[in-house]
Image (cartoon, helix red, strand yellow):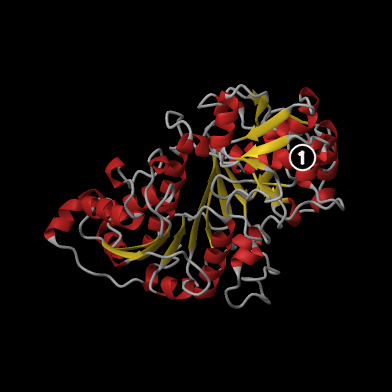
């Protein structure tokens, strides 16, 4: 089912390229025809992170002629567990530069186009215009809906992937007759709901699994071979090692790709999604204590009850010797706390413990404060020996 | 029938990845599930009792919106999957915590 194959103009291969791609060329399903299509193809990767890393590397190795990358982030140490396009020496560098270097190292014949920007409603259509296929490796709802709508409006297939802990989803969306992301999930979670990033995390190899599925689908679309993941979503469960498929139907009432679309240009996606990309910021009303002051008062022997509202596996990474009640268990375990004592609640960054303090104050606790900045701030400002995560 | 619980919701379902319930319809299966695990209810339904728009339900491999929604009849051996939208390690919970 050639989706975009007919739009791509063939080029030619040098002798060096023939040698490089020989294991493709000797396969009838690829052959010279397929390899020339790959060379002529222009693929845009949104993000050079967990999903973007493996898919950009494999697309480059496979000989995709032009790879665009949209990213404005800088490599940090927490990325290295899964973002294999970046190396330890790249920490602190722009992901775009690090990714380009890795791609060129694998295949110098690839043209890399770098877009150092946050994809938004103003720039998406003009960036997408010069590419044949868009691969969505984003990590937040506003960009996900933006990529979807921009793909529908520009008529570019959206090779979708998403990951959570041990689970992933992959599909090919927004093709001419196939469903789009809005057919599947018409709306994002409404504002007011709380993202549970604390429960997040991701197995490092999972974006590898899902990103390589995205790369496979991209290459199939370019070559016009096989059955792409159109009209179905692949669910990956790495723990059970199960791969399941669900049907995905095109919704004739879809607001963007339906028969009478109500969305005909890009909208404000931050507003549409209620701006909830990160952990919700702590409400300013909650009383706080700074790490230095807490340290001083503990050293002076004051009676302060430290309440740790993180998860048990986080407690194992580092702790302040606090009493552990995970935030989610607090309502049913509140009786374990003594409201007459002074309580300082903390978590990793101060967001969850802010909610805990708010909850406890509503439950009648008067002497409860939030440790500003959590164990991260404690590590920065009081005890540098405490590991950060 | 078997109901498959996605990772983010397992903490509200006794940490199980699947729950077996007797039921005639999808709606009945969900009622039995949420009766057994009451914390799940607010994650699946809005305050006025409607299924949340960002949680999709599949009977075997078909979206129940394209069957008879919650009135869809089910048989022993069927599998109901709860498939929430996910993005970047964050899952959106229906309540403060």
A221 on left or right of A39: right
Task: State the residue at coordinates (57%, 74%).
Answer: A266
Closer to us: A170 or A190? A190
* Residue B3 seen anywhere in this rendered image of the structure: no
Answer above or below: position of A47 versus A333.
Answer: below
Task: State the residue at coordinates (69%, 53%).
Answer: B54
Location of residue A41 in the rendering, given as x and y in whole percent from the top left corner: 33, 66
Q: Identify the secondary structure beneath mark 1.
A: helix
Location of residue A389 in the rendering, given as x and y in whole percent from the top left corner: 48, 36
Location of residue A2 in the rendering, given as x and y in whole percent from the top left corner: 43, 65
Quarter of the image where one finds residue A235: top right
Tally the marks. Answer: 1
Answer above or below: position of B47 versus A313.
Answer: below
* Residue A379 seen anywhere in this rendered image of the structure: yes
Closer to us: A261 or B26? A261
Location of residue A342 in the rendering, given as x and y in whole percent from the top left corner: 72, 29
Chain under disc 1: A
The residue that label 1 is drawn on is A359
Quarter of the image where one finds residue A191: bottom right
B73 on left or right of A145: right
Closer to us: A92 or A16? A92
Mark 1 Cα shell of 10 Å, populated few (<14), some (14-19), many (≥20): some
Closer to us: A366 or A201? A366
What is the residue that sits farthest to the left in this orientation?
A: A15
Indicate the quadrant containing the C terminus of chain B: top left, top right, bottom left or bottom right.
top right
Indicate the quadrant containing the N terminus of chain B: top left, top right, bottom left or bottom right.
top right
């Amino acid at each position: 089912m050639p989706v975009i194959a007919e739009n791509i103009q063939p080029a030619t291969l040098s002798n060096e390229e023939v040698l490089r791609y020989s294991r493709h060329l000797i396969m009838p399903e690829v052959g010279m025809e397929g390899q020339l299509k790959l060379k002529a193809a222009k693929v845009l990767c949104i993000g050079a992170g967990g999903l973007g890393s493996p898919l950009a590397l494999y697309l480059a190795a496979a000989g995709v002629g032009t790879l665009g990358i949209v990213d404005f982030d800088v490599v940090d140490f927490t990325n290295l567990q899964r973002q294999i396009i970046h190396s330890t020496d790249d920490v602190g560098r722009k992901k775009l530069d690090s990714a380009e270097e890795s791609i060129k190292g694998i295949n110098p014949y690839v043209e890399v186009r770098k877009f150092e920007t946050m994809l938004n409603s103003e720039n998406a259509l003009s960036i997408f215009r010069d590419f044949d296929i868009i691969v969505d490796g984003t990590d937040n709802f506003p960009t996900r809906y933006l990529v979807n709508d921009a793909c529908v409006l520009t008529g570019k297939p959206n090779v979708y992937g998403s990951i959570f802990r041990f689970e992933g989803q992959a599909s090919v969306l927004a093709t001419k007759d196939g469903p789009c992301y809005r057919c599947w999930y018409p709306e994002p979670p409404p504002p007011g709901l709380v993202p549970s990033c604390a429960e997040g995390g991701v197995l490092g190899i999972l974006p590898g699994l899902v990103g390589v599925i995205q790369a496979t689908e991209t290459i199939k679309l370019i070559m016009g071979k096989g059955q792409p993941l159109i009209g179905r979503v692949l669910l990956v469960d790495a723990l059970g090692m199960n791969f399941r498929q669900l049907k995905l139907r095109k919704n004739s009432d879809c607001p963007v790709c339906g028969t009478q679309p109500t969305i005909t240009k890009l909208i404000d996606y931050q507003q549409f999604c209620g701006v909830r990309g990160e952990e919700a910021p702590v409400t300013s009303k909650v009383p706080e204590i700074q790490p230095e002051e807490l340290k001083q008062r503990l050293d002076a022997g004051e009676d302060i009850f430290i309440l740790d509202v993180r998860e048990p596996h986080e407690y194992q990474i580092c702790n302040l010797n606090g009493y552990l009640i995970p935030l989610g268990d607090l309502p049913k375990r509140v009786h374990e706390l003594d409201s007459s004592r002074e309580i300082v609640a903390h978590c990793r960054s101060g967001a969850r413990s802010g909610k805990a303090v708010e909850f406890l104050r509503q439950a009648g606790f008067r002497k409860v404060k939030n440790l500003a900045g959590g164990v991260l701030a404690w590590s920065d400002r009081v005890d540098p020996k405490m590991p950060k995560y | 029938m078997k109901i498959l619980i996605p990772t983010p919701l397992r903490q509200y379902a006794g940490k199980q990845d699947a729950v077996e319930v007797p039921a005639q319809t999808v709606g009945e299966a969900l009622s039995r599930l949420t009766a057994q695990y009451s914390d799940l209810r607010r994650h699946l339904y809005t305050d006025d009792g409607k299924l949340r728009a960002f949680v999709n339900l599949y009977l075997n491999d078909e979206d129940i919106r394209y069957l008879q929604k919650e009135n869809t009849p089910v048989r022993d051996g069927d599998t109901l999957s709860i498939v929430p939208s996910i993005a970047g390690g964050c899952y959106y919970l229906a309540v403060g915590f």
